[in-house]
Amino acid sequence: MVCCVATILSSACGVNLKRLRREGETPKIAADRTAKAKQDAYTESRLSELLTATVNESSCGGFETHGHYCEGGEENEQNCGFSGAWCNSALKEALKHNPAGLSFGVFSFDEFSRELSNKHGVRSDLYDCYYTAATHPIKDNYTMPYKRHDTCLSAQEHTDESGRKFETLSKQLKGHGPLSALVKIDIEGWEWQVLEDMLASHPAELDKIALLDLEVHFCQKMEKASDKEEDGIGLHPSKQIPILEKLLKHFAVNYFAKSMWNAYTRGFSGCPGAPGTMGNVNLVNRKMLQKM
């Protein structure tokens, strides 16, 4: 039945007018809302699919787990697990070639480089321009020396208004050989533009990374970014899909842990189209899989 101006006032069209008037929702608005809901459902489903592990614990000869990550917050211990899990066979293969650790995004601690140092004798370079060696010295003990750099990652090299220095991942990988770097990127929303730049302009450089530990932010703006620096990808899950699709041509997921924690609201929330607010994902270079 075709609804017209006269008949839309009746229930014959299957429209709840009280609800529409209460919400100020016209049929067009309702249709747009339905279309958006379908798109959000697809986006969430696709992101979840991309981040599902395709390298299992058995094929890795076990996982080396570390950290603590709760989907719903540690205070209620909802769906808690490990924050990361390295693929044992890939890690053992990488360790044969004297790899270097590169940890982007640190505080007064850095579990990634500490584990590499104390368990595997790997030296690391630690990078952060907001939490620097002077303001946030590392408190943990290391068996292997590490080096701090007051530098952040970005898609373009620049110095911001406060004098903070930003460099590209391709520059930090310069001088490293194939599958010789163990990399962690935890840079609060800046990861999307860094990955996008690497995939578009320096894809071959990704093959220098044997293992990649990545914190992804599905619905948070880039932390402390200026309006000029903000790229908006972290606020639009649909824009993250093609980046992950391209990344997974180089890497395979072996572990993923998600959280609903939102650093801006200081509480737990998500956003339409996202499987969580953020998550930790462990990846193995596909060329490393051939060596396992």
Image (cartoon, rainbow, N blue to C red):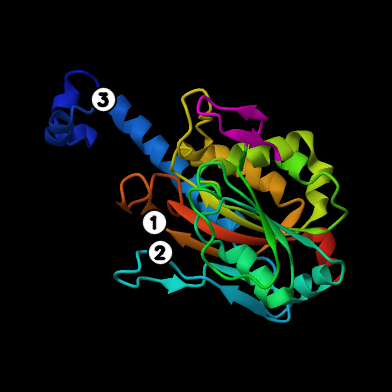
Mark 3 vs mark 2: in front: 2
- Residue occupied by mark 1: 260
Report whether 251 appears left or right of 241: right
SS category of the residue bearing label 1: loop
Q: Up-down: is 121 above or below 174?
A: below
- Residue occupied by mark 3: 3
Q: Which residues are magenta?
A: 154-168
Task: In this rendered view, identify the residue nearer to me: 227 or 16.
Answer: 227
Asked whether residue 217 is in view, the answer is: yes
Identity, as a three-letter code, of the amino acid under mark 3? Cys
Report whether 123 appears left or right of 277: right
Mark closest to the chain's N terminus, 3 or 2? 3
Q: Mark 2 touching mark 1, by CB under 8 A?
A: yes
Quarter holding the N terminus is: top left
Identity, as a three-letter code, of the amino acid under mark 2? Glu
- Residue occupied by mark 2: 71
Q: Residue at x 70, y 37 (%)?
A: 168
The local crowd at label 3, few if under 14, some if 14 to 19, many if 20 or more residues have their Cα within 10 Å, is few
Instruction: Reply yes or no: does residue 36 show up in magenta.
Output: no
How far is disc 2 from disc 1 in space, using C-alphas? 6 Å
Residue furthest to the front = 134
Q: Residue at x 52, y 48 (%)?
A: 134
Task: In this rendered view, identify the residue nearer to me: 248 or 100.
Answer: 100
How far is disc 3 from disc 2 in space, using C-alphas? 46 Å
Secondary structure predominantly adopted by residues drawn in magenta: loop
Mark closest to the chain's N terminus, 3 or 1? 3
- Tag shown at residue 111: none
Q: Up-down: is 73 above or below 273?
A: below
SS category of the residue bearing label 2: loop
Q: Residue at x 76, y 39 (%)?
A: 171
